[in-house]
Amino acid sequence: MSLHYPIEQFKQFKESITRFMMVYKFALDEMETKVKILNEEFHLLHDYNPIEHTKTRIKSPESIIEKLVRKGCEMSLPSIKRNIQDIAGMRITCSFVSDIYRISEMLGRQHDLNILEVKDYIKNPKPNGYRSLHLILEVPVYMSDRQEHVCMEVQIRTIAMDFWASLEHKIFYKYNQSVPDRLLDELKAAAESSASLDLQMERLHKEISVMREEQSASELNLMERIVINNQQFTIPTALLEMIREDK
């Protein structure tokens, strides 16, 4: 059965929905710019970049309504804004667990971002094995006639965590939420293996970083020496000071 609405009323309603969803798109644009700046800074100035890649999404109106119904909330745009905080979402993928908390701290230091809630599923994994750090942020969006504070969700996880979450989602989609117990057990075991891999890779990364620092110190020590006629001499501090004075 088709529903018929007065054309003008429908146009106004459509415009209201478009304006409502538009601010969430702008909030994502703001966050993408912030993360892009961090990404470029690490790429240009540091020897290591903790950000592997990012992905953004906006919930469909159907998904928003379904979540509103599940929560038993009033069916209105103000109610959606109050009760649904993950309409806009960003996922930041890192190499190591320590990177997750590092990026979270960097976002927390940005004075125009307000962190409303932190859900740490790394220290406290979900029963199915899911691991990730979830932040609910309030992002300022500057419109032509007003400023809006828009809630969005940022998920920060390692590559291994992201791979597991993607696999789990595909399995649940294939079985229409009714996953056999055997597969659930294997998924949880895979989550444990994934966490162990993250810890192992973190240890390797730290060891390599220490070796790199020791190598740099050794290279600097060699630079302060000269060899003449197979005899090695240390450059005196006074001569090294001359280099600084020449600058």
Image (spheres, rainbow, N blue to C red):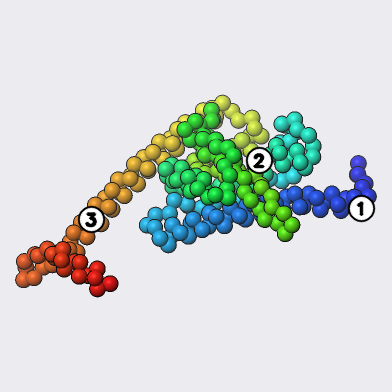
The correct choice, above or below, for 47 with respect to 207 in the image is below
Looking at the image, the residue that sits furthest to the bottom is 246
For residue 241, side relative to residue 202 (left or right): left
Q: Which residue is mark 1?
A: 7
- In three-dimensional space, the C-alpha distance between marks 1 and 3, rounded to whole angstroms, equals 74 Å
Q: How many marks?
A: 3
For residue 55, side relative to residue 142 (left or right): left
Residue 122 % position (x, y): 48, 35
Looking at the figure, which quarter contains the N terminus?
top right
- Please report whichever mark, 2 or 3, sits nearer to the chain's N-terminal start: 2
The correct choice, above or below, for 170 with respect to 182 in the image is below
Q: Which residue is mark 3?
A: 217
**Contact, CB < 8 Å: mark 2 with mark 3?**
no
- In three-dimensional space, the C-alpha distance between marks 2 and 3, rounded to whole angstroms, equals 49 Å
- Please report whichever mark, 2 or 1, sits nearer to the chain's N-terminal start: 1
Query: At label 3, which amino acid type do we have?
Result: Ala
Q: Which mark is residue 85?
A: 2
Front one among 48 and 62: 48
What residue sits 23% from the left and 55% below the top?
Answer: 217
Front one among 154 and 197: 154
